[in-house]
Image (cartoon, coloured by chain):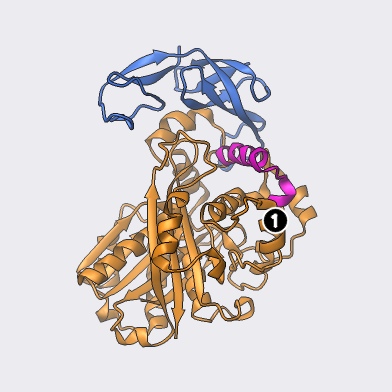
Chain colours: A orange, B blue
Amino acid sequence: MIVAGVEVPYARHPQGAATGDLLARAFGEALAEAGIAHGEVDGLGVSSFTLGPDHAVDLAWRLGIAPRWLMDDCLGGASGIDLLQHALRAIQAGDASVVVLASGDHFEPADFTRLTEHYNLTTRTWLRPLDAGVPNSLFAMLTSRHMRAHGLDRADYGALAVTQRQWAAMNPRAVYRSPMTLDDYLAAPMVSDPLGRFDCVPVVSGADAIVLVAADHPAARGRAVRLRALRSRYNRDHQEGDGLVTGLADIARPLWDDAGLGPDEVDLVSVYDDYPVMVLIQLADLGFAADGDLRSLVHSRIATRALPVNTSGGQLSAGQAGAAGGMHGLVEAVTQLRGTTGERQVAGARIAAVTGYGMVEYRYGMCANAVVLEGVR
Amino acid sequence: MSFAVFECIRCGTRVFPQRYYCRSCGGGQWREVEVAEGTIEETTVVRHRMGAGSRPGALLATVATAAGPAVIAKLEAMADRGQPVRLRRDADGTIVATP
C-alpha cells in the first residue's frame, strides 16, 4: 500500500540546494505525511541523474537509516514505476516492510547539457557530434511522423498543452501556472520544427517521494492507495520501429486483466509527458482511444476533462525535475486518490492509471511501464 | 570516410549502431557493410537548443539507409521526405547526409 506521496516544490533556477538536499527533504516530508517514524524505514529506493558520485547507500547513510532493502534506479522517465515494481515485490517477499522511494535532481544549465550529450554511449558517440539539440530534435521528427500517421496538426497537440496548463493553474506547486491560449502555444518560438517552446518540458530542480508499506501496517488503515496492477516492457523493438508505439501496447492487455478493469473505468490518468505526442501515443497504447480517433480523444475527452489527464499540469507545466519526472505523475495520482489535491481534485477519484516512458537510446524511448492504482479509505 | 552498418555473420541481420549480440539469432559476430546511399524519412530544423555551441538552423534527418537500418544524420541542405541522399561519416563521428 502507498501511504504517502510528496513533491518538494519544483523551481526553475534554484540557488544553493544540492540533489541530496532535495531528496532528503522529500524523504522527510513523505514520512511526516505517512505518520511513520524515521526508525521504521527498512527499505530505500533512489533515482537521480545528479546524485553522483553518491548512490543510494550513501544517501541512506546521510539519511541515518540502515535499510534491509536498497535500490538504485536508472530508468529516468520510467524510474518511479520501476522502483515501485521492485519495492512491491520486496515487501511481498518480506525483504522490507516500510520503503521510501525518492527521485530528484538539481540542475545547473551545464549539468543538463552534460546529461543530454552523454545520456548513454550511443548518444555520446553518434548523436553528440551532430550538435543538434537532442532529444528535442528526435521527438520533433517523431511528432512529424505521428502527425502524418493520424492526420493531426499542431493545434491538436497544442490543445493538450493548453489543457494541462489549465490544470496547472489549480496546482500551487506548478512552475508555470499563468493562463495559456492556443494562440500563445502556436505563437511561441519554434525549438525544433514542428515543436515549439510549449511542446518541450521546462527543466527544473526538485524531488518526489512515496512511502510503501505492507498491507497490515497501521499506516495503511488511513487513506491509502493499493496497487492493482503493474507491468513493464523495455526495448520492445530494438529502436528499429517508428517510435509511434511503446512497450505499453504489449502490456496493456495483461495490465487491465491483472487490474480487473478497463480504461473506461479509470477516473484519472498520469501519462509521462516529455512531449505532447507521447501523451497521445501512450494513451492509445493503453486503449484509451479504442476507435483510433486521436483528435476526438484530445478535443472531446481530454480538453473537456471528461478524461482527466495529467491533473498536476504534467511536466509540461509543472516542470521536469530530471529523474523526479518519473515519479511526478505517480505522486499526483496518489494525491488525487487520497483526496488531498484541493482545487483540482477529481471528484470521487478511485481508480488511476500512471505510465512511465523514457530513456532514449538512439531514436526514441526504450522504457515503458504502467500501474493501475486504487484509492481505499 | 565511408559510413558502415553492421551485419550479423550468422543470419545477415543488419543494425546500426553496433550491438553485442544479434536480436534475431543471438549471434555475436559482425561484419561492417559500407552504405553510401539512403532516403530521407524525416527532417527537422533545430532553432534553439540549451547550452553553448548552438548552431541555429541546424538541419537533422532520419535516413533509411539502402542497407536497411535508419540513422540520424546531419543534413547538409534541406530536402524533402523520400529524397535520396549520399551518406558519409566524418572523422569526429558525425554522420552526414547530402541531398
Q: Main secondary structure of the magenta part?
A: helix
Res. A19 visible in picture: no
Magenta-colored stretch includes residue A365: no
In front here: A228 or A142?
A: A228
How many numbered markers are drawn?
1
- Quadrant containing the N terminus of chain B in the rendered view: top left
Query: Residue A220 or A11: which is nearer the viewer?
Result: A220
Q: Position of A341 compared to A207: left or right?
A: right
User: Is residue A38 left or right of A377 when viewed as pictured?
Assistant: left
Image quarter for residue A32?
Answer: bottom left
Residue A228's quadrant in the figure? bottom left
Is residue A166 at all visible to an observer of this figure?
A: yes
Circle 1 residue: A296
Q: Residues within 10 Å of mark 1 (few under 14, many from 20)?
A: some
Looking at the picture, how far across and down is residue A350, in whole percent? 51, 77
Q: Residue at x 59, y 16 (%)?
A: B85
User: Mark 1, chain letter?
Assistant: A
In the rendered view, tell whether residue A29 sits above or below residue A174: below
Where is A277 relative to B1, above or below? Answer: below
Give SS at disc 1.
helix
Q: Which residues are magenta?
A: A137-157
Residue A75 image offset from top left, x and y in percent: 39, 52
Q: Which residue ends up furthest to the right in the rendered image? A: A183
**Which quadrant would the C terminus of chain B be assigned to in this image?**
top right
What residue appears at the point 44 percent right and 86 percent down from the top-left corner? A377
> Where does residue A48 sit, x and y in percent of width and height?
39, 56
Is residue A155 in the magenta section? yes
Dot 1 amino acid type? Ser
| Residue A187 at x, y percent in the picture | 78, 48
Q: Which residue shows up at 39% across the image and 14% down it?
A: B33
**Which residue is depicted at the point 37% across and 63% down?**
A20
